[in-house]
C-alpha cells in the first residue's frame, strides 16, 4: 500500500472554464450546422462537445504531490534530497522568476489560472536544471511540505 502524500493538489481549471468552454464548442457546432439537414445537423455537436470536454479535462489533469521522499509533478519526479530551498511565490514573484531574465534550463510547470507558485532551488551537481517552478494554489504549504520532507530524508 502506498504511503499517504505529505502534500497533494490538482491544478484543475476554475469552475467557470467548463461552461465557457462547452458554450464555445456549442457555438462553433451551431456555426457548422447552419440549419443543414442530414449528417451536418448532428455531427458537429457529437464531435465538438466531447472534444471540448476532453480538452478541458486534459488541461486540469496535472497533480502536484510530495510523497515518499519525492516531489511529483505530473510525470516528473524529484527526490527531495536534491532540494536546496523552496520559495513560495505570489503572482508578481512568479512573473519575475519566469519573466525576461528567466533561466532557459529551469523546469517549469505553470498554469495561468493558478496565481501562486513555488520555486524549488536544486542542489544536484549532475543535473543542469537550476530550479523548478511549479504552480500551486497553496504555495506556502507546498514549500513547507518540501522542506519538511527534505529535512526528514
Image: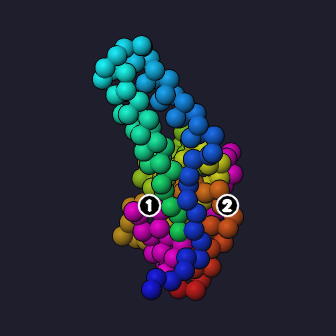
Say left or right for 48 vs 131. left
| Residue 47 visible in the picture | yes
User: Which residue appears at 57% of the width and 68% of the height?
Assistant: 8
Callout 1: helix, strand or loop? loop
Which residue is labeled 2 in the image? 138
User: Which residue appears at 48% of the width and 75% of the height?
Assistant: 70
User: Which residue appears at 51% of the width and 50% of the height?
Assistant: 60
Alpha carbon of mark 1 to alpha carbon of mark 2: how far?
A: 17 Å
Residue 62 in the image, given as x and y percentages of width and height:
48, 56
Residue 74: mark = 1
User: Which residue appears at 66% of the width and 72% of the height?
Assistant: 144
**Quarter occupied by the N terminus:** bottom left
| Residue 94 visible in the picture | no
Looking at the image, is 147 positioned above or below residue 101?
A: below
Residue 149 in the image, given as x and y percentages of width and height:
57, 79
Which residue is most to the top?
35
What span is colored magenta in the figure? 66-93
How many residues crowd mark 1 within 10 Å: few (<14), some (14–19), many (20+)? few
Amino acid at each position: 500500500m502506498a504511503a499517504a502524500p505529505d502534500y497533494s493538489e490538482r491544478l484543475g481549471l476554475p469552475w467557470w472554464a467548463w461552461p465557457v468552454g462547452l458554450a464555445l464548442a456549442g457555438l462553433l457546432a451551431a456555426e457548422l450546422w447552419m440549419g443543414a439537414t442530414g449528417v451536418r445537423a448532428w455531427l458537429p455537436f457529437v464531435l465538438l462537445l466531447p472534444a471540448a470536454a476532453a480538452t478541458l479535462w486534459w488541461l486540469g489533469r496535472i497533480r502536484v504531490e510530495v510523497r515518499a521522499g519525492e516531489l511529483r509533478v505530473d510525470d516528473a519526479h524529484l527526490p527531495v534530497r536534491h532540494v536546496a530551498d523552496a520559495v513560495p511565490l505570489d503572482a508578481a514573484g512568479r512573473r519575475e522568476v519566469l519573466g525576461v531574465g528567466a533561466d532557459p534550463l529551469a523546469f517549469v510547470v505553470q498554469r495561468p489560472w493558478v496565481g501562486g507558485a513555488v520555486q524549488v532551488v536544486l542542489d544536484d551537481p549532475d543535473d543542469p536544471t537550476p530550479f523548478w517552478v511549479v504552480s500551486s494554489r497553496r504555495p506556502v504549504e507546498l514549500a513547507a511540505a518540501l522542506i519538511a520532507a527534505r529535512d526528514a530524508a
